């Protein structure tokens, strides 16, 4: 098991302030991960969140060269934050961490937030790596941190058990 960097190793300047901002971690690639093809809502494809995109082959995008701009520009936080261990690549962990421009609940104020979404059920949210990642984002404190599974969203606070 890998530990995720403590607060001193992750500062606000390293967290992107816009959902698609930030440099990518050198040496990391999506490989055969297609978790974003399930969790993201892609309006131009009439694809709702939580449903596998009809263009996914299971290991790649069937329209990769012609995919929508939103797909071209989107990267999960595993691709952007080197402190997240290899085990947290979404296809390995079952959790996609991202910075989103809106909270996952309709009854809270909108604004940038970190969201950890379960890909195939909430079980993955309880893994040691996911638990430590949630704790790291909460300690870092730049954005509200949400844990999302199916239709449930929980706002994480310092001291919460994940």
Image (tube, helix red, strand yellow):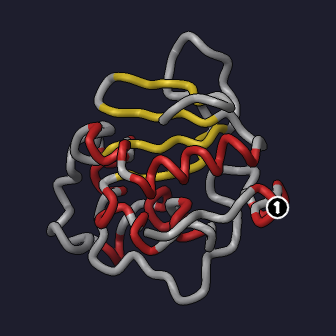
**Residue 54 higher or lower than 60, as above or below:** above
From this view, report whether residue 159 is shown above or below residue 40: above
Is residue 113 positioned above or below 75 on the image? above
Write the residue at 36% across / 43% down: 126
**Is residue 157 at least partly visible in the picture?**
yes
Q: Residue at x 38, y 46 (%)?
A: 40
* Residue 51 horizontal/vertical position (percent): 22, 42
Residue 13: image location, x then y, percent: 84, 60
Residue beneath disc 1:
8
Q: Nearer the viewer, residue 151 or 122?
A: 122
Q: Residue at x 67, y 65 (%)?
A: 5
Residue at figure coordinates x 61%, y 36% from the top left: 145
Residue projecting furthest to the bottom: 27
Kindly give the residue lying farthest to the top in the view shown: 107
Residue 66 image-quadrant placement: bottom left
Q: Nearer the viewer, residue 60 or 44?
A: 60
| Secondary structure at numbered mark 1 | helix
Could you tell me if residue 42 is visible in this image? no
Q: How many marks?
A: 1
User: Which image quarter holds the N terminus?
Assistant: bottom left
Relative to 114, 74 lies left or right: left
In the rendered image, residue 55, in percent from the top left (x then y), is placed at 20, 61
């Amino acid at each position: 098991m890998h530990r995720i960097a403590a607060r001193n190793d992750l500062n606000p300047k390293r967290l992107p302030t816009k959902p698609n901002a930030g440099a990518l971690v050198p040496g990391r690639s999506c490989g055969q991960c297609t978790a974003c093809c399930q969790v993201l809502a892609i309006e131009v494809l009439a694809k709702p969140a939580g449903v596998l995109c009809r263009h996914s082959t299971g290991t790649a995008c069937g329209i990769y060269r012609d995919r929508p701009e939103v797909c071209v520009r989107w990267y999960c936080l595993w691709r952007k934050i080197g402190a997240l261990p290899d085990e947290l690549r979404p296809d390995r962990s079952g959790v996609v961490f991202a910075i989103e421009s809106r909270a996952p609940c309709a009854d809270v104020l909108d604004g940038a937030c970190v969201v950890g979404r379960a890909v195939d059920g909430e079980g993955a949210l309880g893994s040691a790596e996911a638990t430590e990642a949630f704790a790291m984002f909460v300690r870092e404190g730049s954005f509200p941190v949400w844990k999302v599974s199916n239709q449930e969203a929980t706002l994480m606070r310092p001291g919460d058990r994940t």
